[in-house]
Amino acid sequence: MKAGIHPDYHPVVFEDSSTGKRFLTRSTSTSDRGVEWADGKTYPLLMVDVTSDSHPFWTGTHRNLDTQGRVEKFERKYGKRSRAGKEG
C-alpha cells in the first residue's frame, strides 16, 4: 500500500437521533463532539437519523402509505383533466 494516501480509520460512536441508542464502531468520519464510552475512553460522536434500531425494516413497524384515493385527491384539488387531443 502507498503511504499517506489512506484516510485515518479510527473508533467512533454513532448515536441514533430518534432512539438515543449508541454503538461503537470504526469509521473515517470525524466529529467535533465527543462522548465517553464504557471503557473510559473518549471517542468522536456522530449523530445519525436512522440505524437498525429505528429503521422500519428492522423494527417491523412499517408505515402504510395511503395509495388508494390519490387520483381522486388530485382531481378534487386540481379538477378533472380532459384527455381531448390525445388521440393516437
Image (tube, rainbow, N blue to C red):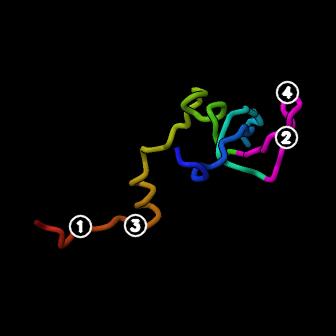
Residue bearing the label numbered 1: 83
Q: Are marks 4 and 3 in contact (CB under 8 Å)?
A: no
Q: Residues within 10 Å of mark 1 (few under 14, many from 20)?
A: few
Q: Work out whether 37 lies above or below 49.
A: above
Q: Position of residue 38 (x, y in %)?
A: 85, 27
- Amino acid at circle 1: Arg
Q: Is 79 situated left or right of 84 in this image? A: right
Quarter of image, res 17 = top right
Q: In terms of sequence position, does the residue under pointer 4 or pointer 1 come before the other? A: 4
Counting residues from the start of the chain, the first of labels 4 and 3 encountered is 4
10 Å neighbourhood of mark 3: few (<14), some, or many (≥20)? Answer: few
User: CA separation, marks 4 and 1?
Assistant: 68 Å
Relative side of 16 to 69, left or right: right
Residue 3 image offset from top left, x and y in percent? 59, 49
Label 2 CA crowd tier, 10 Å (few <14, some 14–19, many 20+): some
Counting the numbered discs, the total is 4
At numbered mark 2, what does the secondary structure look like: helix, strand or loop? strand
Q: Which mark is residue 79?
A: 3
Residue range of the region highlighted in magenta in the rendering: 32-47
Residue drawn at x 73%, y 32% as measured from the top left: 24
Q: Nearer the viewer, mark 4 or mark 1?
A: 4
> What residue is drawn where x is 67% and y is 37%?
26
Give the residue displayed 66% in from the left and 42% down from the top.
9
Q: Are marks 4 and 1 in contact (CB under 8 Å)?
A: no
User: What's the distance in space between the residues labelled 3 and 1, CA to CA?
Assistant: 13 Å
SS label for mark 3: loop
Q: Residues within 10 Å of mark 4 (few under 14, many from 20)?
A: few
- Is residue 11 shown left or right of residue 72? right
Indicate which disc residue 35 carries: 2
Label pair 3/1, CB-CB below 8 angstroms? no
